Amino acid sequence: MTERNYLRPPWAARVIGGRMARLFKPQVVSLLSVRGRTTGTWRSTPVAVLTHGGQEYLLSAYGDTEWSRNLRASGTGRLTRRGRVDQFTAVEVGPDQLPALVDDYLRQFGELPSVARTFRALPDPADHPTFRISISITGHDRP
């Protein structure tokens, strides 16, 4: 396993950006929940789900983040999107698939604040853990 870089998001992106994006772009931004690899406590963060070649992917724009490490360890998580909670399984994709997925991610989400800037700071596709997800249980509508 190669060592991956991590780019800490600016304060505004961490504290305000994700919440605002979920309000103003709910069709794009979902809430990812993954159990912590040490505590087992559910941790949540906003993400954009990439659809590519009929499959869904989670790509860590900021590099080797806590959520990507947790997902790598657990292999499962939950996505809340458009009022539904879905459980999924995840498999990390190989390095040969990363360039095409990163290119498509930038085409689909490059206009979101900080996305293009993040990829300029971490230009190597290998720095962006990416997981193919498969919905295992379709959840319920949130109350």
Image (cartoon, rainbow, N blue to C red):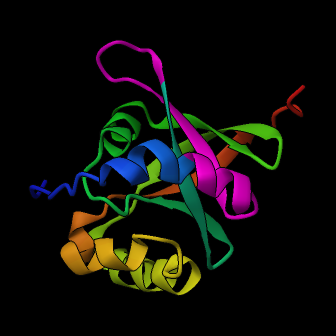
Asked whether residue 81 is drawn in magenta, I would say: no
Residue 48 placed where, x, y %? 57, 61
Is 137 positioned to the left or the right of 30 in the image? right
* 133 and 61: which is toward the camera: 61
Residue 95 placed where, x, y %? 27, 71
Residue found 83% across the figure and 42% down from its top: 83
Q: Going by the picture, which residue comes out furthest to the left?
A: 3
Position of residue 60 relative to residue 32, above or below, is below
Where the C terminus falls, by quadrant?
A: top right
Is 54 positioned to the left or the right of 35 in the image? right
Is 143 positioned to the left or the right of 59 in the image? right
* 48 and 86: which is toward the camera: 48
Residue found 61% across the figure and 43% down from its top: 31
Residue 43 placed where, x, y %? 47, 27
Asked whether residue 41 is drawn in magenta, I would say: yes
Labels in figure, total: 0
Residue found 39% across the figure and 51% down from its top: 12
Residue 138 placed where, x, y %? 81, 39
* 12 and 30: which is toward the camera: 12
Residue found 55% across the figure and 35% down from its top: 77
Per the rendered image, the range of residues in magenta is: 19-42
State whether residue 123 appears in this view.
no
State whether residue 52 appears in this view.
yes
**Picture quadrant where residue 60 is located:** bottom left
